[in-house]
Amino acid sequence: MADSTTQKSDRFAGLAHSEAHYFNSYNHHGIHEEMLKDDVRTRSYRDAIYQNRHLFKDKVVLDVGCGTSILSMFAVKAGAKHVIGVDMSTIIDKAKEIVEVNGMSDKITLLQGKMEDVKLPFPEVDIIISEWMGYFLLYESMLDTVLWARDRYLKKGGLIFPDKATIFMAGIEDGEYKDEKIGFWDNVWGFDYSPLKHTALTEPLVDTVEMKAVVTDPFPIITLDLYTVKVEDLAFSLPYELSVRRTDYVHALIAWFDIEFSACHKPVKFSTGPHTKYTHWKQTVFYLQDVLTVEAGEKVVGRLDCKPSEQNRRDLDIAVDYKLETSDMGRTAEGRGLYKMC
């Protein structure tokens, strides 16, 4: 057996490896191309900045996780005095070239490194902009870094773009896909692969859900105010209550998030839900062990637990308790699903 020192060093080596994997995933231009082509995402940031030039004029702006520096350049176009972009990945080398060919090198300083380690050329900033959202809003834990930057560099009365985020949940009918995804393991080329069935159920699916599949009203699980939220608030256990819209089946629960730039003169918002235009975040699908047979007017109630994984803080451990509230004893059902986003 390894001694405790060896175990600790192995664990920290694992953490360092996971961090390197996270940052390396943003080295390639392909992931940035997908984000830049996301019209809802990029247009919302552009509109929030361009429509509020009075807030950006002559201000010092910090772009956390700047990537290819599109948000930094929006800020310069809106009249910012100077923008500091920080990113750990090597895409920042291309960002410097992009900034230069667009004639903004004198207005934008790009720094490669972890936000917590770099030294900014200004003691404080007027505005923080960041596109920090991951799948299920919190996957990859980049919000932790934005909050660190807020506490370290944002001047009193400074602004954050965006500043509010809400996670929603709803129930969906998705029997055909569940059979395809989960039932597949019952017979694989004539063999019983059911041991992998449980594994498949524990992995949330990131996919686009059609609005017609939604069986319940949405429920807001949690709203984060970026001016006041703390890192410890990002681990939570909260109740939910889903009102059933129509008689149908519920095979899975889905989650999405809405984003708001509330500091704007004309507030800018966007949603990643099934009811609106496509975004690269899609929706997060949690398949249930049970199939719930529901009738209009009934409720599915429960609790959602979410916390960073102990093995890798950028991963999420999610637990969903669910119970169908019905007067029909033949249809009662309750259970608990354990999921890992990694």
Image (cartoon, helix red, strand yellow):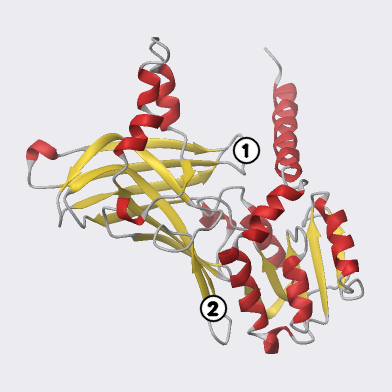
Q: Residue at coordinates 41% horizontally, 35% vertically from top-left? A: 338
Q: The C terminus is located in which quarter?
A: top right
Q: Is residue 142 left or right of residue 13?
A: left
Q: Which residue is mark 1?
A: 312
Nearer to the camera, 99 or 238: 99
Quadrant of res 148: bottom right
Q: Residue at coordinates 74% horizontally, 45% vertically from top-left? A: 23
Nearer to the camera, 271 or 19: 271
Q: Secondary structure at mark 1?
A: loop
Nearer to the camera, 40 or 93: 40
- Residue 197 picture location, percent across and down: 40, 24
Per the rendering, the mark at residue 262 is 2
Question: What amino acid type should be assigned to the residue bearing mark 2?
Answer: Ser
Quadrant of res 118: bottom right
Quadrant of res 145: bottom right
Q: Residue at coordinates 73% horizontally, 26% vertically from top-left? A: 10
